[in-house]
Image (cartoon, grey):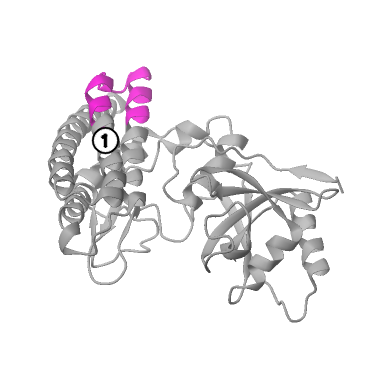
Amino acid sequence: MESIIQLPITDVVPFHAYQTRGMEAGILLASVENAKEFLFNSCINYFFRFGEGKRFFDYTCDKRSWFFGQDVFYRQTYTVDMERETRAEILKKILHWLSHGIYVYGFFNEKYIPHKGAYGRQDFQHAYLIYGCDQPRELFFAMGYTDNRKFEKYTIAYPDFFNGIEHIKEPIFWLKYLNTNRAYAFDLHQVYWELRDYLFSQYTVQEGYGKHPEERYGVSANQAFRKYACRVEDDDGYLDPRYSRFFYENKQFMLERLCYMHQCGHIGDYSEAYAAVTKQSQTAHMLFLKYNITHHHRIPAAIDRLLKQVNDADEQILNQVFDELTVHFEKERQGNYR
């Protein structure tokens, strides 16, 4: 077994709002030549749950693992028995998995993990991904959010890692490895149907799992997100920046997808028009951050106006794109029957 192992991964990813998205995208982008084009197939439609209980704003890919049911990642579950297994025995298993190209995903208590915002201050259960190890220095290589407020690579000393998993209930390792035998390619049909779901506010079904009665999808999710931001002063007085970052990242990724589709000759050039949408969504994200610092009473109204402009322009442009793709596929169908 090699003394230093680093499995393929990158922290330069289009998704930072949620760690799991960034982790899986990081593996894919570092391992597959056409990963970006493959990612363009999805990450279009999303949901906003705005009812009693917890709120969520996320892609409708599915709710468990980003590529569940798509033969992208294989996943196995290993429940850790801290009473029967020693640290040395568990470490031996982790090193074995890493040496066989398997990433280790799970949750630990960040109160015991240096480089984390909660370190030494409060209990906070959060996800980690281990992609390698340095045995001479007794370190794991990991990726996620750090106390720099960045999604990046960092290291964890073996003792700190075990302190972290020993201070949560029922620690579990989810072992992930990439399906390298699968074809990863751009699929215009998949883009078309998920875009349709987005514009018609329909749930994008992956094996029919995960639909919730309090969720709004696509353009309706945009309206629910705007409503959430507008009502902040009547709610808990806090705007979750994960939501605004997710919203902005979605628009930025859509801009890249539209540029790619134009370069392939599938649609016209919407780069300038949609770049304005992306810029406005970024501004909305910055206003989320500003409000949480200043709580200035005028900021929610400014966000509301901005989100209305973003949502209106987004819907108008993407409807035009959808119409173009409809014509494209109609011509393709007619050509096949000649």
> What residue is shown at x 25% (from left), y 40% (from top)?
284
Q: Main secondary structure of the magenta part?
A: helix
Q: In this orientation, which residue lies closer to the viewer: 54 or 109?
A: 109
Q: Tell how many labels.
A: 1
Q: Residues within 10 Å of mark 1 (few under 14, many from 20)?
A: some
Residue 323 located left or right of residue 142: left
Q: Position of residue 225 (x, y in %)?
A: 22, 52
* Residue type (three-letter) at the residue carrying disc 1: Thr
Name the secondary structure under disc 1.
Answer: helix
Q: In this orientation, which residue lies closer to the viewer: 1 or 74?
A: 1
Q: In this orientation, which residue lies closer to the viewer: 217 or 332?
A: 217
Q: Position of residue 213 (x, y in %)?
A: 24, 68
> What residue is shown at x 15% (from left), y 58% (from top)?
231
> What residue is shown at x 48% (from left), y 32% (from top)?
36
Give the labeled residue for mark 1: 283
Q: Position of residue 241 (x, y in %)?
A: 34, 50
Q: Which residues are magenta?
A: 255-277
Residue 123 located left or right of residue 92: left
> What residue is shown at x 52% (from left), y 55% (from top)?
117
Residue 217 located left or right of residue 126: left
**Vertical placement of residue 280 versus 268, above or below:** below
The reply to whether residue 78 is in sight is no
Per the image, is 262 magenta? yes
Per the image, is 238 magenta? no
Q: Position of residue 25 (x, y in %)?
A: 52, 42
